[in-house]
Amino acid sequence: MTDVWIVIAVVGIATVLFKAAGPVFLGRRTLPSKVQSVVELLAPVMLTALVVTQTVGGDGELSLDARIPGVAAAAATLAVWRRAPLVGVMAIAAVVTALVRVVA
Amino acid sequence: MRDGVRAALPLAPGPLLFGLAFGVLADAAGMGVVAATAMSATTFAGSAQFGAVTVLDAGGTIVAAITAAVFLNARYIAISITVASIFPGGRARRLAESQLIVDESWALSGRSGRFEWPILVGSGLLLYVLWVGSTALGTILGGTLGDPNGLGLDAAFAALFLTLLVPYLRGRRAIQAAALAAVITLVLIPLTPAGVPIVAAASACLIGLKR
């Protein structure tokens, strides 16, 4: 339980500082463009890693299971409807995966 | 500020359901209502919270969970810099109001072509209340859902990250970095403890140094 609180505290403090970086610490100065282009890529890179681990991550191994058709259905939805609502995409993935689990 | 609240109202179902989903995941990870709500109140950034709790839920270390969340939120350095000059008042007030910067409030505040403080703060406040409230509710509901994976919720969370990812995949460099991150993650999943692949994948952003 203490582990969880350490995560909450450290992530909370880091986020407060990140959000304050511009308005409080930087004012009107700007970041060097090299730093800026690396920081801009952090979000897509981390989100991709989360998609992959959440889709095929198992207990210390790759696990190919019913999550894959579910996530594929979500990806297909986003491919035809780029701005599809988050909850709808999540529901599609959940329903497809649950159905495959029932059938398989 | 009222304009900001009004601007964010059509978006309300998003953070509301997103917060419910976070509460459900936090409950599955054994966090409890107080911890989950405290995290939403202090971090107020959905994807990083999901990232940290996903790593913990998979049995990753606290260092891996913290690193994943901190890397995910590092974008707020860049985001907050774009709106650095619109916050009025002294340091303490700017510190407090800057916490209302989230992806959605930031995007709304720049819709007119220049960033507007009343929109950012108004929409940020509404989103904050929805986010913290729905997290608490989701944690309580989570206990009544049974095994979330049986319902396909594990795939739903993958779909959540995928949906958040799509708007970032603009431009060749972002797509290349994401592809590299996917490869790193796939290679490391069988080789390293949970959480490590996600942290290692962050190195893919160094593509940004390439000309």
Image (cartoon, helix red, strand yellow):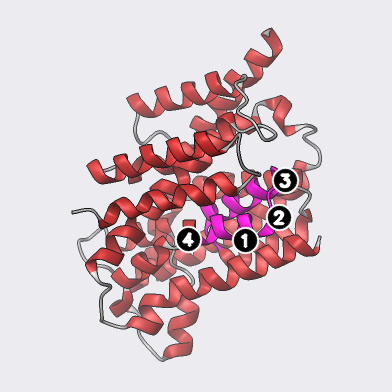
The mark nearer the N terminus, 4 or 3, is 3
Query: Mark 2 and mark 3: span between their CA atoms?
Result: 23 Å
Alpha-carbon neighbours of circle 4 within 10 Å: few (<14), some, or many (≥20)?
many
- Where disc 2 sits, the SS reads helix
Q: CB atoms at circles 1 and 3 under 8 Å apart?
A: no
Tags 2 and 4 on a common chain: yes
Amino acid type, residue under disc 2 in the picture: Ala
Chain for numbered disc 2? B
Viewer-side label of 1, 3: 3
Question: Residue A35, percent across and down?
Answer: 30, 66
Is residue B68 inside the magenta stretch? yes
Q: Nearer the viewer, residue A4 or B176?
A: B176
Residue identifier under label 3: B59
Q: Is residue A87 visible?
A: no
Which mark identifies residue B40? 1
Magenta segment boundaries in residue numbering: B44-70
Q: Amino acid at mark 1?
A: Ser
- CB atoms at circles 2 and 4 under 8 Å apart? no
Look at the picture and state if B79 lies above or below B142.
Answer: below
CB atoms at circles 2 and 1 under 8 Å apart?
Answer: yes
Q: Residues within 10 Å of mark 3 (few under 14, many from 20)?
A: some
Distance from the alpha carbon under mark 4 to that under mark 3: 21 Å
Q: Which residue is mark 4?
A: B73
Q: Quadrant of residue B111?
A: bottom left
Q: Give the residue at mark 2.
A: B136
Image quarter of the C terminus of chain B: bottom left
Chain identifier of the residue bearing label 4 in the image: B
Above or below residue A21? Residue B196 is: above
Label 3 SS: loop
